[in-house]
Amino acid sequence: MGRREFGQDAVQSFLQSRKIATLEELKKALGSSSTMTVFRRLKPLGYQTSYSHRGKYYTLAGTPRFDQQGLWDYDGVWFSQHGNLLSTSKWFVDAADAGLTATELQPMLHVEVKEPLLQLYRQKRIERKKIEDLYVYLARDPGQQRSAVRTGKRHGSWVNR
């Protein structure tokens, strides 16, 4: 039991001082080569993974100071209170009254979003409409979709239909 607490303390103090770390850095801090050991130490502390960098970075749950959109950036590594990149992309699409194009969402999330949006669409978690030459991603709610097409504007790229 004492060894386990030491491991949790080591992970906690390491992440408190560094803010974020990779799995390899956490293994090194624990003096372990086991991935499961790291996760056994992280779980009781509560942690989040980055949505950027393919979820490579970890932080303690209480560390991020999320902005109004639920995002936190630490040295170019992005975390979201909405979860991974798929969940975060879905949340942004659902929250957008007029839907979003990949070109609009990418600067909001600071990562490439074409593949995640396509995956969400194929999983039927969001909708997609082609308007002029653009794919607009929309919430699954039909009322919100009608509103998006009726009020949609893309900086002059598409107009009311």
Image: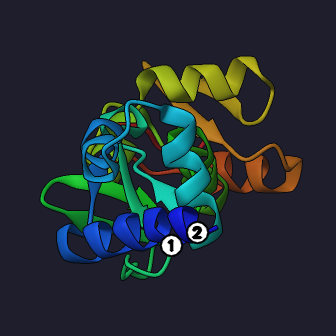
Q: Quadrant of the C terminus?
A: top right
Q: Is residue 35 visible?
A: yes
Q: Is residue 156 above or below residue 2?
A: above
* Residues at marks 2 and 1 touching, judged by CB atoms closer than 8 Å: yes
Q: Left or right: 72 with respect to 40?
A: left
Q: Quadrant of residue 4?
A: bottom right
| Residue 113 in the figure: left or right of residue 25 | right
Which of the two discs, 2 and 1, labels the residue nearer the N terminus?
Answer: 2
Q: Label 1 is placed on what type of residue?
A: Ala
- Quadrant where the N terminus sits is bottom right
| x then y, percent, for residue 64 | 38, 76
- Distance between the alpha carbons at the discs numbered 2 and 1: 5 Å
Which residue type carries mark 2?
Gly
Residue at 25%, 64% in the rendered image? 73
Percent x, y of residue 33 = 38, 30
Which structural element holds mark 2?
A: loop
Q: Is residue 57 left or right of residue 133?
A: left
Task: Tell me the residue that label 1 is attached to.
Answer: 61
43 vs 131, nearest the viewer: 43
Residue visible at 77% across and 56% down in the picture: 144
Q: Residues within 10 Å of mark 2 (few under 14, many from 20)?
A: few
Scheme by which the image is coloured: rainbow
Question: Looking at the rendered structure, which numbered label has been put on residue 46?
Answer: 2
